[in-house]
Image (spheres, helix red, strand yellow):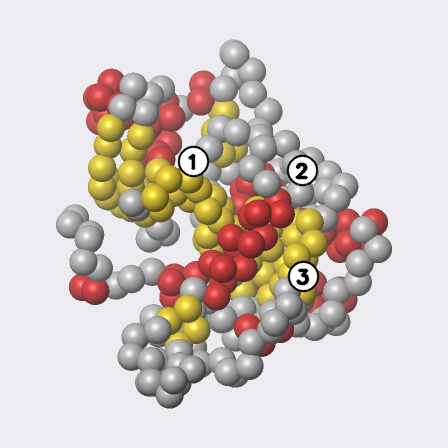
Amino acid sequence: MSSVKIPASKPSRLEIIGLSDVPFINPGDDLTGIILNTLKLNDLKLVSGDIIVIAQKIISKAEDRCFNLNDVIPSLEAAELAEEVDKDPRLVELILSETRFIARTRPGLIIVESKTGLVHANAGIDQSNIEQSDTAPRALLLPVDADRSAETIRLAIKKLSQVDVGVIINDSMGRAWRRGTVGHTIGCAGVVALSDQIGDLDLNGRVLQGTEVALSDEIAAAASFVMGQANEGRPVTLVRGAGHMVGGSDGFKTLLREDNTDLFKDW
């Protein structure tokens, strides 16, 4: 998938507002209705060119991607891998169910290429910020198709509010060679994910030869900073000032390198 040329003018100011009073999300909840109502509670009104960034966790909850580990029967492969990495074999079974290829393992960690094409820890499966009990441990999987989830919300907002907005679904992921997690795009609609600046001029008139900017990842990371990672309770942010990237979108997979251009993928 190719990057997209967008207007050269860029904003000098960006506003990112974390929405307060987002309720706990349950399977089947109308996320669009909840987001629009929460905007009203925060005295905010959408305008065309806004971007809504939504934490993956509430998308997965609404789409009923939460699994009780007591209902999971581990395979022999899962049991063997679980012993190797010191994880619950039921959790490992869920990880394998979402995995295209296992890239690396060590005690406590499984790095995989998931069925969505993402390379990340434990296939993105998480056990934080979901209701747990000692007798019924649960795990939350990523959305099956986060681009589709984003597009569904974008179209519903347009229908109900008559405004064109972009939607980004973000998730926190680690990075090779660096410590710490950063917000990344795992799904998007109505935004340019990857901007092609090849052929543009730098300040000295030199032609850029290979510059592509992961615009949606930059927005996802900035929004994640406002959302927080623990008990902040702000899974939705409104981003204003980046209207130049709102429009058509090829989805988040535009950001993924093709296998034949990836110098580090050895599987």
Q: Which of marks 3 and 1 is nearer the N terminus?
A: 3
Label for residue 233? 2
Amino acid found under the numbered disc labelled 1: Ile
Quick one: label 2, few (<14), some, or many (20+) residues within 10 Å?
Answer: some
Q: Give me the residue at 30% from left, 75% from top.
A: 210
Residue 97 percent coordinates (x, y): 33, 37
Q: Is residue 7 left or right of residue 97?
A: right
Residue toward you, 245 or 247: 245
Question: Secondary structure beneath disc 1?
Answer: loop
Q: Earlier in the sequence, mark 2 or mark 3?
A: 3
Q: Is residue 213 visible from the viewing direction of this image?
A: yes
Residue 226 percent coordinates (x, y): 62, 47
Q: In which quarter of the image is residue 71?
A: top left
Q: Earlier in the sequence, mark 1 or mark 2?
A: 1
Instruction: Write down the residue under mark 1.
Output: 125
Instruction: Write down the residue under mark 3.
Output: 15
Q: Give me the residue at 15% from left, 50% from top.
A: 266
